């Protein structure tokens, strides 16, 4: 499969990932509020989101495919710089910590501490990916900007209350990235040509 086709298919994956970030957030928002903090959790149950875990795992995997398309496009521009490399590495560390934390939680609840660390690394990494995509002109400004805003919005995410809706801008960012990859729109296509 050629590079443009890979990028195009990764765009479709990113758009689907965006939808899969949004739908579970809306479903979760309609569930009863869960406890936050040790004091509340002594008298109140946590919101159960285990039924949505498969959708979120699929969203994470499809986002990784979308990220791969962004990397291929950035590489093709010949501008894959240090910020791009660091942001991708931070995303990889975040995903690794998330998967380890969720997987090893069956052994001991101590490993659950890896989940918030992984989430933080992934969110910051994705915001940096958006900034790097802007610098490398691998995405249109609007798409990279929506990814940055959505990623930073996830810093306020909490699945136990209405802050679960912070996943909606994140999902919109991925839909925008996916559309830009699928349609073949690059940052240079956003720039009006100057007539002299």
Image (cartoon, rainbow, N blue to C red):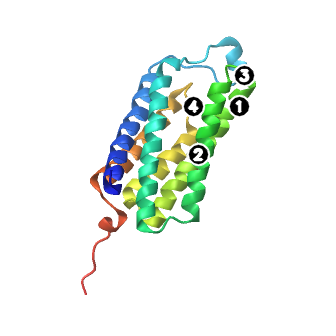
Of the two numbered discs 4 and 2 in the rendering, the one whose residue sits closer to the viewer: 2
- Residue topped by disc 1: 113
| Secondary structure under the numbered disc 3 in the rendered image | helix
Mark 4 in CB contact with mark 2 (< 8 angstroms): no
Q: Is residue 183 left or right of residue 31?
A: left
Instruction: Give residue 80's position: percent from left, percent from top.
Output: 50, 64
Quarter of the image for the C terminus: give it.
bottom left
Of marks 2 and 1, the one in the foreground:
2
Question: Residue 136: where, in percent of width, then height?
Answer: 46, 66
- Labelled disc at residue 28: none
Upstream in sequence: badge 2 or badge 1: 2
Crowd tier of the residue under label 4, counting other residues whose Cα lies within 10 Å: few below 14, some 14–19, many 20 or above: some
Give the Cα distance between marks 2 and 1. Answer: 17 Å
Whether residue 25 is situated above or below residue 156 in the rendered picture: above
Callout 2 secondary element: helix
Tag 3 near tag 1, CB within 8 Å? no
Point out the tag, 3 or 2, that comes first from the N-terminus: 2
Question: Nearest the camera: 14 or 65?
Answer: 65
Q: Label 3 to label 4, Cα distance in Å?
A: 19 Å
**Could you tell me how far apart the alpha carbons at marks 1 and 4 are, in whole angstroms?**
15 Å
Residue at the disc numbered 3: 109
Q: Could you say where residue 7 lies in the image, as x and y percent from the top left? A: 36, 52
Mark 2 lies on residue: 92
Mark pair 4, 2: CA separation: 22 Å
Report if the CB atoms under discs 3 and 4 are less than 8 Å apart. Answer: no
The answer to which of 109 and 34 lies nearer the viewer is: 109
Choose the circle earlier in sequence order: 1 or 4.
1
């Amino acid at each position: 499969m050629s590079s443009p086709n890979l990028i195009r298919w990764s765009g479709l994956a990113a758009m689907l990932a965006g939808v899969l970030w949004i739908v579970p957030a809306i479903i979760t928002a309609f569930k009863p509020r869960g406890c936050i903090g040790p004091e509340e959790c002594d008298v109140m149950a946590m919101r159960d989101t285990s039924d949505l875990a498969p959708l979120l795992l699929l969203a994470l995997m499809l986002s990784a495919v979308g990220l791969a398309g962004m990397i291929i496009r950035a590489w093709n521009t010949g501008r894959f710089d240090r910020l791009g490399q660091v942001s991708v590495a931070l995303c990889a560390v975040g995903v690794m910590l998330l998967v380890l934390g969720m997987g090893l939680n069956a052994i001991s609840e101590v490993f659950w501490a890896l989940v918030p660390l992984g989430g933080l690394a992934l969110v910051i990494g994705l915001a940096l990916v958006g900034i790097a995509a802007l610098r490398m002109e691998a995405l249109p400004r609007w798409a990279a900007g929506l990814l940055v805003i959505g990623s930073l919005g996830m810093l306020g995410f909490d699945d136990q209350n209405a802050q679960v809706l912070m996943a909606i801008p994140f999902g919109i960012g991925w839909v925008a990235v996916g559309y830009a990859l699928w349609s073949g729109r690059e940052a240079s296509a956003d720039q009006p040509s100057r007539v002299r």
